């Protein structure tokens, strides 16, 4: 993984093509890059982020900010009801209950505000 201006890039190597292929993984917009060496893939990753940000500015569009703290999920209504009930049993609101569960599942230690 690589990080630049808050954007995280994941890279895979294609042995047949002899190329590194990468993509930004913490944005909804599709941003990709490629290179033939480690140095080149790093440069291309940073260049892709810069080009994306410039393009958004030119278009008058706000770039998709990484780690904005919002997550949209489609879940079955029955699961949502069960989650609300579980949160109430723990005297938490639904958001706090979900964050606790996600943090535990990701092995992330957080301290609720």
Image: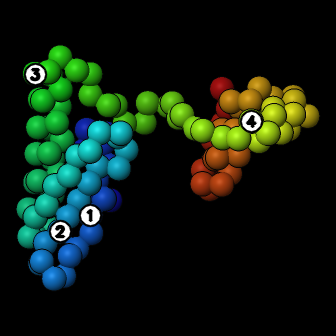
Q: Position of residue 1 (x, y in %)?
A: 32, 59
Which label's residue is closer to the chain start, 2 or 3?
2
Along the polypeptide, which appears first: circle 4 or circle 3? 3
Residues packed near mark 3 inside 10 Å, few (<14), some (14 to 19) or many (20 plus) = few
Q: Residue placed at 27% from the left, 69% from the top? A: 12
Marks 2 and 1, Cα distance to the nearest angstrom? 6 Å
Give the residue pinned by disc 4.
77
Q: Secondary structure at mark 2?
A: strand
Q: Nearer the viewer, mark 1 or mark 3?
A: 3
Disc 1 designates what residue? Answer: 11
In terms of sequence position, does the residue under pointer 2 or pointer 1 come before the other?
1
Q: Which residue is mark 2?
A: 20
- Closest to the observer, 6 or 71: 71
| Picture quadrant where residue 37 is located | bottom left
Q: Nearer the viewer, residue 44 or 76?
A: 76
Closer to us: 58 or 112: 58
Residue at x 10% of width, y 54% of height: 43
| Mark 1 or 4, nearer chain start | 1
Task: Report the quarter where the C terminus lies.
Answer: top right
Pointers 2 and 1 in contact (CB under 8 A)? yes
Neighbour tally class for label 2: few under 14, some 14-19, many 20 plus, Cα within 10 Å:
some
Q: Which is more toward the observer, 109 or 22?
A: 22
Q: Secondary structure at mark 4?
A: helix
User: Viewer-nearest of labels 1 and 4?
Assistant: 4
> How far apart are the alpha carbons under marks 1 and 4?
37 Å
Q: Residue at x 31, y 59 (%)?
A: 10
Task: Write down the residue under mark 3.
Answer: 58
How far is mark 2 from mark 3, CA to CA?
29 Å
* Circle 4 crowding by C-alpha within 10 Å: few under 14, some 14–19, many from 20: few
């Amino acid at each position: 993984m690589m990080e630049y201006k808050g954007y995280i890039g994941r890279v895979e190597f294609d042995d047949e093509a002899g190329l590194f292929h990468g993509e930004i993984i913490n944005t909804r917009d599709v941003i990709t890059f490629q290179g033939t060496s480690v140095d080149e893939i790093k440069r291309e990753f940073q260049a892709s982020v810069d080009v994306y940000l410039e393009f958004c500015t030119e278009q008058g569009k706000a770039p998709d900010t990484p780690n904005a703290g919002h997550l949209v999920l489609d879940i079955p209504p029955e699961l949502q009801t069960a989650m609300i009930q579980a949160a109430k049993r723990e005297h938490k609101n639904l958001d706090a209950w979900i964050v606790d569960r996600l943090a535990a599942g990701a092995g992330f230690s957080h301290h609720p505000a």
